[in-house]
Image: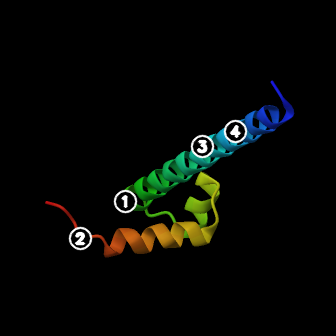
Amino acid sequence: MDIIEQVAEIRAGKALEKGREEGREEGREEGNEKAVNLLLANTEFSADKIAALVGVPVSFVKKVKENLQSTPEVK
């Protein structure tokens, strides 16, 4: 294997790892959003309390709450 192939292999490996990390981050965010949704729907906790419990910023909780309120209820 020459140097060009080695560099290409290294770049491909780095790109793959970056993609995996982005996927993990997306999964964490989806999980956090789901947890916030459940707490908003099933408790009377404040945005501050929910943020502390889930480990997200209060702005994240407020954004999820706005999205939840703007989504029509399915019956």
Which kind of residue does numbered mark 1 sit on? Ala
Disc 1 is placed on an element classified as helix
Label 4 is placed on what type of residue? Ala
Residue lying at 40% horizontally and 71% vertically, measured from the top left: 67
Residue neighbourhood size for the residue with mark 2, other residues' Cα within 10 Å, grouped as few (<14), some (14–19), many (≥20)? few
The reply, left or right, for residue 70 in relation to residue 55 is: left
Q: Which of the two discs, 3 and 1, labels the residue nearer the N terminus?
A: 3
**Amino acid of disc 2:** Pro
Chain-order first, disc 1 or disc 2: 1
**Residue that mark 4 sits on:** 12
How far separated are the C-alphas under marks 3 and 1? 26 Å
Disc 3 vs disc 1: which is toward the camera?
3
| Residue situated in front as seen by the camera: 2 or 30 | 2
Q: Which of marks 3 and 2 is nearer the N terminus?
A: 3
Q: Horizontal placement of 7 versus 13: left or right?
A: right
Question: Mark 3, mark 2: which one is toward the viewer?
Answer: 3
| 64 lies above or below 13 | below
Q: Position of residue 62 (x, y in %)?
A: 51, 72
Where is mark 2, residue-wise?
A: 72
